[in-house]
Image (cartoon, rainbow, N blue to C red):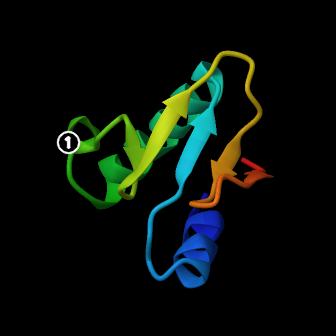
Amino acid sequence: MNSALQSHWKQHQNQYPRFILSPEDHASLMHEIAVVREVFGPSALEFPRDQYHGAPIELRPGAAPTVVALDGSETLLEL
C-alpha cells in the first residue's frame, strides 16, 4: 500500500487516492499496524482505522484490495 500511495502522489501532485479493502484485509492491515506501533511508535489505538496515511479506506465485503486514483481508475494491490 505504501508503494501505491507514493506512486499516486507522484502522478497526481500529492493528492490522495482511496483504498478499497475487504473487512478481512482491513483487519489484517490494522493488526500489522498495531504490531509495528507496539515496537516503534504510538499506540495503535491512535491510528485512524478509516484511512491509511491520510488516504480513505472503504470497506467492501468480498472486494479485492484496490487503490482508486483521482480519475477513478482502479489498480489491484498485493497485500
Image mark count: 1
Asked if residue 13 lies left or right of residue 8, the reply is left
Q: Is residue 65 above or below residue 14?
A: above
Q: Position of residue 46 (x, y in %)?
A: 20, 42
Q: For residue 39, what is the image quadrant?
A: bottom left
Q: Quadrant of residue 8?
A: bottom right
Disc 1 packing (10 Å; few <14; some 14–19; many ≥20): few
Of residues 48 and 71, which is closer to you in this image? 71
For this view, does 78 lie left or right of residue 22?
right
Task: Tell me the residue that label 1 is attached to.
Answer: 46
Q: Who's the residue at 35% across and 35% down the image?
A: 49
In percent of the image, x 71 and y 39: which residue is there?
65
Q: Residue at x 73, y 55 (%)?
A: 73
Residue most extreme to the top: 61
Residue 43: % across, % down: 22, 44
Q: Residue furthest front?
A: 71
Residue 79 is situated, as x and y percent measured from the top left of the image, at: 72, 47
Q: Hey, which quadrant is residue 70 in on the image?
A: bottom right
Q: Looking at this view, is 38 or 31 the one in front? A: 31
In the displayed structure, 10 sits above or below 8; it is: below
Q: Is residue 45 above or below residue 12?
A: above
Image position of 46 (left or right of 17): left
Q: Amino acid at mark 1?
A: Glu
At horizontal 61% and vertical 57% (from top left) the residue drawn is 1
- Taking depth in this image into account, of 45 and 56 the one nearest to the observer is 56
In the shown orientation, is residue 79 left or right of residue 2? right
Element at badge 1?
A: helix
